[in-house]
Image (spheres, rainbow, N blue to C red):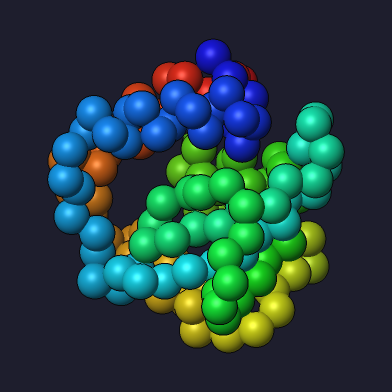
Amino acid sequence: MAKFLSDPWFDEVEKLRAGAGDIPVPDAVKGLKVNMVVTGHPEGEKHIHIDSGEFKRGHVEGAPTKMTVPYDVAKKTFIDNDAQAGMQAFMSGQIRVEGDMSVIMRMQAAGAAPPNPKAKELESQVRAITEA
């Protein structure tokens, strides 16, 4: 098991993704890029980006939106699938968004749609390799 967003975690997720084959991306998030700063990570601040629904290392040029999110909120939202935790954190000011807010709304809408069975299986595998 690896700590969420650590290099070993990304290494394992990349292997799982490669083994999962082609997973359709919801139209709402195709091509969406969001830079994210995750604060409070045990290894220090993490700079990542989301590209068409996938977490990737580092920031990407041209992303219209940047989010700053506490580590515990990011883990609850993205690994535990606790959308309510993300919404509460946003409403309380724990999540800061710079740039195009409509990108976040599109991501949220895509998250509400029923997941593809292959995507659901990959989520389960990622959850299984992520340290509690």
Is residue 11 something that shows in the picture? yes
From this viewpoint, which residue is outermost toward the top?
1
State left or right for residue 98 relative to residue 77.
right
Residue 17, given in percent of the width and then of the height, sits at 31, 36
What residue appears at the point 56 percent right and 78 percent down from the top-left corner? 62
All told, the count of numbered labels is 0
Residue 21, given in percent of the width and then of the height, sits at 17, 38
From this viewpoint, which residue is outermost toward the front?
61
State left or right for residue 73 relative to residue 120.
right
State left or right for residue 90 relative to residue 50.
right
Residue 37, given in percent of the width and then of the height, sits at 72, 56
Question: Closer to the camera, 89 or 12?
Answer: 12
Which of the 4 image quadrants contains residue 122?
Answer: top left
Is residue 82 something that shows in the picture? no
Is 14 rendered above or below residue 26?
above
What residue appears at the point 50 percent right and 84 percent down from the top-left corner? 102
Question: Closer to the camera, 66 or 91?
Answer: 66
What residue appears at the point 24 percent right and 50 percent down from the top-left corner? 115
State left or right for residue 84 relative to residue 73.
left
Which of the 4 image quadrants contains residue 113?
Answer: bottom left
Which image quarter is the C terminus in? top right
What residue appears at the point 49 percent right and 49 percent down from the top-left corner? 55
Which of the 4 image quadrants contains residue 109?
Answer: bottom left
Is 10 rendered above or below residue 110?
above
Question: Closer to the camera, 115 or 11?
Answer: 11
Which image quarter is the N terminus in? top right
